[in-house]
Image: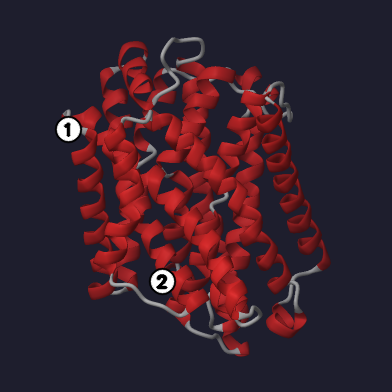
């Protein structure tokens, strides 16, 4: 029993790397904005998104274990050249939107903690992410996973301390579990929260992480590895879900109705004045660690997407420089960074169906997945969740055009 438990623990890691993307700076912006403006009313969005993300990440990992391929590689085998290029372009744009949020988040954190200019902070965030990627290249996946897990575990400290100082209202929490959308702005935040939680690029990435760790798994070993993967995903998403929910609860309990809480800078000042200087500093530290770790994961995902769909590799340094350019431009021309973060999360949400639909079709295919094919119930649940996200996005686009 002890030996079996130790073996399971040695298999943990890929899901925790993927989970970093679920607590990136876009989550900070969306979740704190939602809690400060609407209290506990959008808590149900986080619960739904986290449950869905758990299922999605498990299915993505299963694709890598069963086929020995990443999800982009599986998709590429079923598309013609022009279709692969078009699909890659939209996936690449989603990855760039992800990088935008993460680099800006790191820049804001460095500005809050050390008063560094945003432009310098964006460049430093890019350099740190490159250094972390070099660990993956030269020290291997397991060392990289340990570094990322260590960073992930730092992120929730400040939020838990804040909730200990300012506990949430129990009735408000229960009421927040009831679905409600009362305005276009509320819908915008809900879609941003979905985009920040169910990240398209990390759906592609997790299949590659499992493939790289285990390769194509034999039938004899598959059942055991799938059990270990469920545990890995479950534990990682509990951590990520707790972080996201604690963000919204802290904002709802401590910042509701306070002025200037629609920006990360305003949230930092509000936490300093209304909770404690320690919690504000820990908030800044969490944001910084989140920016460093998540932009690393995002860059890795972009490389997986490119290699899988169009069979091209770009040197890490070149890719890092190219993908950081949009964030640097936005910072340089003075666009409100927090607003850019939230809009980037909406862009991510629009990209979710392009990742979920192939995942649904692949994992429901007996020809591809063999005995590990989805049950009908799982296919129905994933199909329904994907439909909900598509409908939310269509409504948002329609209201934006009409408004």
- Residue 225: in sight, yes or no? no
Q: Residues within 10 Å of mark 2 (few under 14, many from 20)?
A: few
Numbered circles on residues, count: 2
Compared to residue 123, the image places residue 220 above or below, namely below
In the displayed structure, would residue 47 be above or below residue 377?
above
Instruction: Decide: is 157 above or below 202.
Output: above
Q: Which mark is residue 146?
A: none
> In the structure shown, which secondary structural element does the residue marked by tag 1 occupy?
loop
Residue 323, picture quadrant: bottom left
Tell me the element at label 2: helix
Q: Is residue 193 visible?
A: yes
Residue sitting at 59 percent across and 75 percent down?
Answer: 82
- Tag in front: 2 or 1: 1
> With respect to residue 27, does 318 lie above or below?
below
Q: Locate the C terminus and report the quarter of the image it occupies.
A: top right
Write down the residue under mark 1: 116
Q: Position of residue 55 (x, y in %)?
A: 64, 58
Q: Nearer the viewer, residue 233 or 64?
A: 64
Circle 1 Cα neighbour tier, 10 Å, few/some/many (<14 / 14–19 / ≥20): some
Task: Calculate the distance from the C-alpha at mark 2 to the C-alpha at mark 1.
Answer: 40 Å
Q: Position of residue 354 (x, y in %)?
A: 63, 59
User: Could you tell me which residue is drawn at 48 percent across and 22 percent down?
Assistant: 251
| Point 50% across, 54% down: residue | 94
Q: Is residue 140 left or right of residue 308?
A: left
Question: To which residue does mark 2 refer?
Answer: 10
């Amino acid at each position: 029993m002890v030996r079996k438990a130790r073996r399971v623990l040695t298999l943990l890691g890929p899901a925790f790397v993927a989970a970093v993307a679920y607590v990136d700076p876009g989550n900070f912006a969306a979740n704190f904005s939602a809690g400060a403006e609407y209290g506990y009313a959008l808590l149900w969005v986080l619960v739904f998104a986290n449950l869905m993300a758990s299922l999605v990440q498990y299915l993505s990992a299963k694709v890598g274990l069963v086929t020995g391929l990443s999800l982009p590689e599986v998709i590429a085998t079923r598309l013609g050249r022009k279709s692969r290029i078009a699909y890659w372009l939209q996936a690449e744009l989603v990855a760039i939107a992800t990088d935008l949020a993460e680099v800006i988040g790191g820049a804001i954190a460095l500005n809050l903690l050390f008063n560094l200019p945003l432009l310098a902070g964006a460049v430093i965030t890019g350099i740190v992410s490159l250094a972390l990627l070099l660990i993956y290249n030269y020290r291997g996946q397991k060392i990289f996973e340990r570094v990322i897990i260590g960073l992930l575990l730092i992120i929730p400290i400040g939020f838990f301390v804040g909730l200990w100082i300012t506990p949430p209202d129990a009735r408000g929490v229960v009421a927040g579990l009831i679905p409600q959308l009362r305005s276009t702005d509320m819908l915008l935040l809900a879609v941003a929260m979905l985009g920040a939680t169910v990240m398209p690029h990390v759906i592609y990435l997790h299949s590659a992480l499992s493939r790289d760790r285990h390769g194509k798994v034999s039938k004899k070993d598959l059942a055991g590895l799938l059990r270990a993967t469920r545990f890995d995903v479950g534990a990682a998403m509990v951590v990520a879900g707790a972080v996201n929910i604690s963000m919204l609860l802290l904002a709802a309990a401590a910042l509701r109705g306070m002025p200037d809480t629609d920006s990360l800078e305003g949230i930092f000042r509000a936490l300093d004045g209304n909770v404690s200087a320690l919690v504000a500093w820990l908030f800044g530290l969490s944001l910084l660690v989140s920016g460093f770790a998540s932009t690393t994961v995002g860059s890795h995902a972009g490389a997986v997407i490119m290699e899988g769909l169009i069979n091209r590799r770009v040197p890490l340094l070149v890719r890092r420089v190219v993908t950081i350019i949009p964030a640097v431009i936005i910072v340089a021309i003075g666009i409100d960074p927090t607003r850019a973060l939230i809009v980037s999360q909406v862009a991510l949400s629009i990209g979710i169906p392009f990742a979920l639909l192939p995942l649904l079709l692949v994992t429901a295919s007996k020809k591809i997945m063999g005995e590990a094919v989805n049950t009908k119930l799982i296919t129905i649940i994933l199909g329904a969740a994907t439909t909900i996200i598509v409908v939310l996005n269509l409504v948002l686009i329609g209201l934006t055009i009409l408004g």
